[in-house]
Image: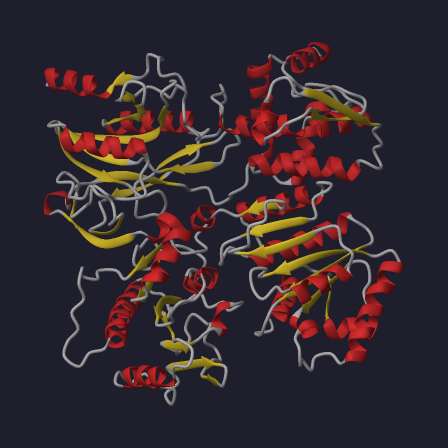
Amino acid sequence: MEMKTFQLNAIAGLNAAMAMPGKRDIILKSPTGSGKTIVLTHFMAEYMKDHAGVAFVWLTPGKGELEEQSKKKMDDYCHNASTKNLADVMTGGFAAGDAVFINWEKLTKKGSNALKDSERTNFLEWTEKALASGVTFKVVVDESHQNFTEKADAIVELFKTDKIVRASATPLKDPNAILVEVKEEDVIAEGLIKKMIHINPDFPAKVTLAKGETHTDYLLAQAWEKREELRNAFVAKGRTVNPLVIVQLPNNSDALLADVERWFAARQVDCEGGTLAVWLSNRHDNLEGIVANDGRQIAVVIKQAIATGWDCPRAHILVKLRENMDETFEIQTIGRIRRMPEACHYGDDVLDSCYLYTFDEKFTKGVRETLGNRALDSRKLFIRESAKKFKLTTEQRTMVSETRDPFVALGSIRAYLNKTYKVSLDQAKNRANLEANGYVFKEDIWKHTQSGDAAVLSEMLRNDMNEVSYSVAIDTHRHGRAFHHEVGEIGASCGLPYEDTRSIVFRLFAAGSEDKTKVLGMSPKALYAFVINNVDRLKDDFRAAMAAELDLRTSEDKISEKDFHFPHEWVCTFDAKAKVQGECEKNVYKGYSVSARPRSTGEIKFEKWCEQTKRVEWFYRNGDKGDEYFSIVYKDNAGRQKLFYPDYILSVGGVTWIVEVKGGFNASEKSENIDIFAPKKSMALKAYSAKHRLRGGFVCYAESEDELFLSEDGFSEDIHDPCWKLLNDVVEKDALRA
């Protein structure tokens, strides 16, 4: 299985957290649909390869055989893994290298028949026997937010572990734990989960029910209409995905269940025909095959059972009739409709979104607060007639590989070190230059900390704190694992696999055959100490080398070109609670709101400028991913093609402009740009504009002057650089020339 970049980063984060002394608890916060189980099982398998005598215990809550699902995934994706369940342990105990999957409620729940008293005693004896034999336990608590009681914690304590990984999409906050977080944006960017959650889309400000119509009827009708739209969209794309509606009932709601079944039966959707599924504690109708994308079920009626461990990517719509659930459970339920059916986006806002229909105000408030801008109000907008004929040439990548060329990467890193630290063929001089710029050259491994007194946390930032350092004698055998781990971390920082990174590190810094890329010629001990002592500096430099402006000649790759037209339909998200509302008259979509979100301060300022500037005829706000949006191809310094989606396309005095709005300059004139690839993108935009005879540039907002500035010739972090010109002045000069 090919791991996604964010998954590899999460594994690296877990490994780093495991290496931190004095911290027992690690929290893995990972959105539903991000492959949390895949991340954890791969992490466990890799960790046990590098650490002898270790066994993992994976604890899960509740019903649904979640522990067996997780065990199966590890068996499927981690070859030669030694996995066990509770029955296996009761038969043969624990052993080093085991990954044991246990439902903790089978050990703790009163009245459970899973284990008799004598068997519980045997479980304790097997645990103690393993500890006595030298097995070191590490514990993973899956879905840690749910049903984790004092009794469950007592089970954890049996293993006398020094590391506990608590995993959840909505973990409980623990200021003493190490947080490893998978960002929702990263999962969306990889196409694994839907781009947007729409809550009650297209609802009027006041819902008026028809005579005899109930609130339940209204919600089901809205969901039915949306499902038909989704189904037609899938058919139009040639996909055999049958979108599923989840209807969630309140507890003690037999009468409501009957109403829901009657509503669907009137549309020839029922249990007898296999198109309606029911999943309640006392009913399990038509659940077989429901998770398949072409499953025949159109809707499933549930209560609470679906909240944990259920994976049905074709579920697109949730009708929520429950009331007053706690916030964590609400978000877990929302997660059931967030996965993409085929683990990719379709370039269609309708298919790349999920939908919630409910009259529960508390529920929508909880989702809004937890998911932030992903749960904004939304409405579908349509293109203005005057903008339908607009056309540009958009660029697409032709390189299939997502990995970087290690030979090109080596040359780029060497060139970056030369530019930044003036390295040459003189290794003694290279060492002096690197040392003068903060690199540490020690025979031993050195660590640093501070010493002093602080009444409050802010006092720990004082400059008069005492610096304390301590060292450990290097041993290539004892510190080999640390060295290889740090090499892997360096590679992860710039998208290179471990093997390639190790080769680059040795060619740059190790003694041996001389070549033009050699910077230092260190012995094995010196190299190990150098990498471990300077891992953070090396990560920063390797990553920066991929984005730096270097005088490199890379092979020219073919770029796929096609016509780009504004999508005729677009879903706009906006903040309905914002005090300032209204329509942007110059946006290419009718009804585009001035309260559109999410937008940066610079984007808000720029859109206001477009509205107020007479020379601007119209503007279009571009998407940030997907084939349906406008993109330009550029390359990093390892030869990998990447896509750049400029923020805006606009017409100024009849001339088409392409504009990217970047993090601007604060009141102290300090740049707030966080995109290290901004210089490369700016040059790609300049080249594209010249090729197609357009205008293009980067815009930033300078807080100190309350003005927008434009650069059409590169990108600088200095607002006083001549490339930055007052946007209004550029437009006025164009008008005079015209």
The answer to which of 207 and 54 lies nearer the viewer is 207
Q: How many marks?
A: 0
Pick out the residue farthest to the front: 455
Above or below residue 239? Residue 721 is: above
Above or below residue 281? Residue 33 is: above
Q: Horizontal and vertical percent for residue 161?
A: 76, 54
What quarter of the picture does the C terminus occupy?
top left
Q: Horizontal and vertical percent for residue 292?
A: 46, 72
Q: Is residue 457 left or right of residue 730?
A: right
Above or below residue 344? Residue 536 is: above
The answer to which of 544 and 336 lies nearer the viewer is 336
Q: Is residue 3 left or right of residue 632?
A: right
Taking the image as drawn, is residue 523 in sight?
A: yes
What quarter of the picture does the N terminus occupy?
bottom right
Q: Is residue 372 left or right of residue 466?
A: left
At 77% from the left and 20% from the top, the residue drawn is 442
Q: Horizontal and vertical percent for residue 20?
A: 70, 40
The answer to which of 300 and 140 lies nearer the viewer is 140
Res. 440 image quadrant: top right
Task: Indicate how the structure is coloured in the image.
Answer: secondary structure
Q: Is residue 234 left or right of residue 95?
A: left
Pick out the residue farthest to the bottom: 272
Q: Horizontal and vertical percent for residue 511?
A: 77, 22
Taking the image as drawn, is residue 506 in sight?
A: no
